[in-house]
Image: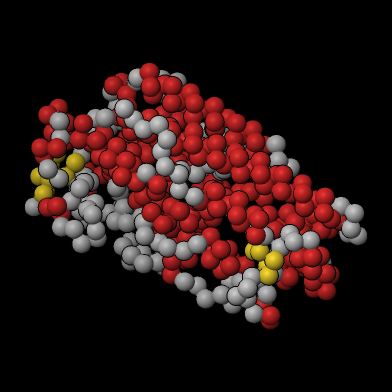
């Protein structure tokens, strides 16, 4: 890091380490220079959009049908930011046929992300988001994957840095996080701020501060970005901003990656909290609106499917099968039989009826012996959840 890139009043954050300088981020909460009219306006818009998303999620007959595919769409994009390339159908296919589908290394990383997110969501109603939980999430995320040998779940004991590539030397690093001996105080402050709601700072603004601080601390040898994005979802649900995990920011961060990195860096170098917070809130607003639109479209699609089968024999059973398609998107006859607790022959008849009504279609690459069916229209709508969206307004 170049000390000259730091404003004079923020150069006291720099410490010399070996061949470079590292940054010690200031403790939370920051000074009130973030409190501007533009930030408060962005906060109001984001709160309104999240409120509407929460309402949309509560007005569908079973929001759990959306949680699973939404999570996996998020996992694909969040992992893609870190160079993990696999598609949503790749992940769903592996989950639909775990005994026969070869597990690709990148798919394992995405499945780990989903497992970490699900375990965190199961934990937060009963416990605070403390350091043991964060370490457990990291262990789940990084176990058994590339670079997973870097002590999953352990706070780093060596210096790391962020460069243009993995081989960028520390002297040329864009950002050098605090050295290991400074992490305890920073993490204690971070966790305390995370778990101490205050009326002085609206929850979405506090969430923006928390995310930036976690990335600045960079407490693990690897996987910090993904854990930081998991924590956003956990906090939204823990503080009951959302009753269901239906809002994900990874597509916004990915499509605005340069701004994402620049704004967070300028918090460290210039204390530019207002610009970062506004950028974050605009992402919340944008992604909440997109998620709400997709929920509405999925609800309408389910109604169309219901119309197709309501006059059929066993319509109640068919509707349960349709809900399985919404939840899992890719299905097999064996899975239908297992979930609906029906015979294989009856499950085959159900699958054939759904195929006849164009609700599902056979994947062209699948063998006759182990056929997998997919809800194509559902997949197309889920693409919007994972699609990158450029920032609209920009910060002036």
Q: Residue at x 18, y 51 (%)?
A: 173
Residue 31, position in %: x, y?
A: 28, 23
Residue 67, position in %: x, y?
A: 61, 49
Quarter the C terminus occupies:
top left
Residue 94, position in %: x, y?
A: 56, 68
- Please indicate, yes or no, whether residue 216 appears anywhere in the rendered image: yes
Horizontal side, residue 227 vs residue 341: left or right: left
Q: How is the image coloured?
A: secondary structure
Q: Is residue 28 above or below residue 200?
A: below
Which residue, as the protein is rendered here, is positioned at the far top? 37
Please tell me which residue lies in front, 162 or 52: 52
Horizontal side, residue 297 vs residue 183: left or right: right
Horizontal side, residue 102 vs residue 282: left or right: right
Q: Residue at x 58, y 67 (%)?
A: 93
Q: Quadrant of residue 36?
A: top left
Quarter the N terminus occupies:
top left
Q: Residue at x 54, y 31 (%)?
A: 49
Please tell me which residue lies in front, 33 or 153: 33
- Please indicate, yes or no, whether residue 62 appears anywhere in the rendered image: no
Q: Quadrant of residue 260?
A: top left
Q: Residue at x 24, y 30 (%)?
A: 271
Horizontal side, residue 238 vs residue 355: left or right: left
Residue 89, position in %: x, y?
A: 56, 63
């Amino acid at each position: 890091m170049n000390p000259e890139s730091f404003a004079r009043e923020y150069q006291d954050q720099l410490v010399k380490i070996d061949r470079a300088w590292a940054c010690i981020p200031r403790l939370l909460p920051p000074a009130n220079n973030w409190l501007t009219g533009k930030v408060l306006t962005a906060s109001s818009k984001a709160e309104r959009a999240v409120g509407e998303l929460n309402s949309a999620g509560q007005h569908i007959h079973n929001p759990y049908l959306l949680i699973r595919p939404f999570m996996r769409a998020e996992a694909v994009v969040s992992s893609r930011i870190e160079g993990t390339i696999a598609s949503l159908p790749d992940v769903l296919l592996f989950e639909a046929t775990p005994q026969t589908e070869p597990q690709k290394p990148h798919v394992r990383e995405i499945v780990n992300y989903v497992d970490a997110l699900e375990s965190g969501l199961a934990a937060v109603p009963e416990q605070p988001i403390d350091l043991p939980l964060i370490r457990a999430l990291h262990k789940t995320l990084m176990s058994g994957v590339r670079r997973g040998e870097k002590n999953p779940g352990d706070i780093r004991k060596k210096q790391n840095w962020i460069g243009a590539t993995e081989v960028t030397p520390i002297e040329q690093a864009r950002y050098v996080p605090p050295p290991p001996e400074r992490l305890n105080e920073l993490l204690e402050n971070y966790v305390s701020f995370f778990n101490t709601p205050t009326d002085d700072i609206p929850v979405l603004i506090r969430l923006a501060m928390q995310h930036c601080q976690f990335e600045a601390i960079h407490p693990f040898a690897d996987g910090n970005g993904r854990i930081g994005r998991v924590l956003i979802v956990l906090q939204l649900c823990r503080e009951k901003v959302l009753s269901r995990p239906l809002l994900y920011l990874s597509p916004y961060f990915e499509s605005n990656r340069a701004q994402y990195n620049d704004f967070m860096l300028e918090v460290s170098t210039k204390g530019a909290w207002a610009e970062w917070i506004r950028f974050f809130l605009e992402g919340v607003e944008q992604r909440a609106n997109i998620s709400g639109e997709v929920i509405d479209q999925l609800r309408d699609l389910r109604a169309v499917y219901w119309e197709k089968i309501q006059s059929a024999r066993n319509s109640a059973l068919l509707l349960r099968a349709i809900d399985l398609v919404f939840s899992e998107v890719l299905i097999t006859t064996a899975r239908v039989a297992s979930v609906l607790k029906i015979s294989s022959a009856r499950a085959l008849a159900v699958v054939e009826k759904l195929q006849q009504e164009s609700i599902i279609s056979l994947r062209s690459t699948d063998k006759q012996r182990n056929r997998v069916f997919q809800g194509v229209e559902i997949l197309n709508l889920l693409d919007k959840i994972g699609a990158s969206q450029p920032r609209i307004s920009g910060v002036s």
